[in-house]
Image: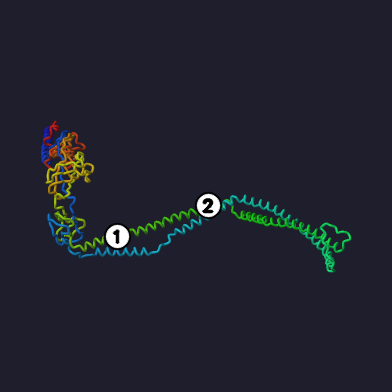
Amino acid sequence: MKNRRKIVIRLMIAFVAILAVLTMFSNTIMNATIPKVVASYASRGNLASTNGATAPVVVENSTKILTVDGRTVDKVNVSNYDTVNVGDVLFTLKPVENTDDLTELQTQLTTLQREATYAARTPATDNGVQAARDAVTAAQQTLNDAQNTLTQANGKAATIAAAQQTINDKNAALTAAEAEVTSASATVESLQSQMDQIDTEIAPLQSQVDVYVALGTPTPTPAAAGVTPTPGTSDIEILCAQINAYNAQKAQLQSQVASAQARVDTASAALTPLKTAIEQAQATIDAANSIPSVSSAQTAVNTAQAALTTAQTNLHDTQINAQIAVDKAQDEVTDRNASIATLQQKIAVLQAKVDLTEVKATAAGYVFNVGVATGDVMTANQTAMMIIPEDSSERQCTVSFSFASSVAESLYVGAQLEITSGYMQTCTVVNIKPDPTNPRDMRLVKCTIDGGDAWPDEQVTVKAAQSNKDYDNVIASSAVNEDNTGSFVYVIVGSSSPLGDKYTVKRVTVTVEATNGTLSAISGDGLTNAQIVVRSEKPLEDGDRVRLEDLSSSSNS
């Protein structure tokens, strides 16, 4: 039993020893594959740096000779730095073999022009606006009539009462007038009867007088009215006196007849207007009785108002639709005319291209940056070559440098930048604006350059300013890496285990505030008290395991 226990103990010791040996060899092999890095802490320090930039020269007054879309170069007559004058042939073109595009555009133009002609000849159509206006007018009249009827219905009782009162009043007056006519007519008849009786009495007397006259008896002078003939007067005188008495009575009766007849005429004249007034009042009553009730009249008003509103809405909608139709028609005309103008322009351009056999210089000077060769099929809006002024003093040359916004703060329009490479003499700032590639942090500084024989695309390096400033995080420039996303560093992340310490790297994005080539001032998250890789024997990636070598004194402590 004791021997078996010893054997087991010895086997366990041997297993542990073998495991330790294997672990040691495993760590040794693994360490051989893990890249070694040198890390350091970023520290606060002063950094003196020179802010420079390099950019190509642009000749602003150069003349670009553009390519002709779809044409094939037959022969190039110039090369770089040849001098040319206006009108010199730069290169020739092969004839156009396929004119289908031009034919298609001409066909489209003909179609549009025909459409324009047909549209101009087409008579105008009824848009319904006048009918809608007439409907509104009729609806308004209907409403007016309904409102008048409602007004009459509201005053119906009063109208009937007033008309009845008129009838009553006029009837009383009519009765009185008719009584007057009857009375006066009776008087006239009575007086006329008396006059007739007098005429009857006069007739025999006159006959007797006529006999006396026939016998030659002289007619006496009539006695004055009311005078009794003198006794003993002749018979004829008596007869004449009696006739005169009767005529006097008749005259009085005639005066009374005239007065009575005047009464008849006056009363008769009053009868007609009284009867007319009664008839009119009765007609008013009849008309009022035909007027509907207030509720019916109000319903008619409501219906007419609704009909008017509908007609007005329909007129409004019809006018809008009519105007829309007019606008559409006008838009069609405008669009068609624009299309015709565009096609005409395209045809003119394409026809000019088809007819074009050679491309000539539009300016005098040096030929530069020739980009076409014999047999090339050109595409649109490309630069075939450039012509720059032959006299360098006439060239308007600019260079646009990209500086950090902190550097550009010290610059201003008119400032002179120091040229450190190139043959130019002066570089003057003329414009400062945000750099489109990074408008938040960078500024584009445009400068004019004078002096020297400047050529397009020639690189010019300038020094903007020299800074001397304290920064929170200064590290060796070798620690800063760059890719298409920007600048970054690798920070050491350590962890402990029974088998030893383990180190990995973490990528941290930073901003390079300044650099002098050897040292760089950086800013970013997680840099405080962090070990930063300044050198590695192999390229690193985020999360890679590393081995530390030659740690800084801060790390050893």
Q: Residue at x 16, y 46 (%)?
A: 449
Place of residue 26 in the rendered image (x, y in percent of width and height, measured from the top left): 12, 39
Residue type, label 1: Ala
Front one among 283 and 253: 253
Q: Nearer the viewer, mark 1 or mark 2?
A: 1
- Numbered disc 1: secondary structure: helix
- Residue 153 appears in the figure: yes
Which colour style is shown? rainbow
Specify whether residue 496 is in view: no
Q: Amino acid at mark 2?
A: Asn
- Where does the image place residue 179, in percent across and percent down from the top left? 74, 55
Residue that lies at the very extreme toward the top in this rendered image: 557
**210 or 81: nearer the eye?**
210
Horizontal arrangement in the rendering, residue 22 relative to residue 182 (left or right) = left
Badge 2 marks a residue whose secondary structure is helix
Distance from disc 1 to disc 2, alpha carbons, whole Å, reads: 57 Å
401 lies above or below 334: above
Determine whether, in the image, residue 391 is placed left or right of residue 254. left
Q: Earlier in the sequence, mark 1 or mark 2?
A: 2
On the image, the x and y values in percent for residue 530 come to: 18, 35
Crowdedness near tag 2: few (<14), some (14–19) or many (≥20) residues, C-alpha within 10 Å? some
Residue found farthest to the right: 232
In this figure, which residue is indicated by the disc labeled 2? Answer: 302
Along the line of sight, the residue nearer the viewer: 450 or 283: 450
Q: Residue extending furthest bottom?
A: 215
- Looking at the rendering, which quadrant does residue 467 occupy? top left
Q: Which residue is mark 1?
A: 341
Q: Quadrant of the N terminus?
A: top left
How many residues crowd around disc 1 within 10 Å: few (fewer than 14), some, or many (20 or more)?
A: few
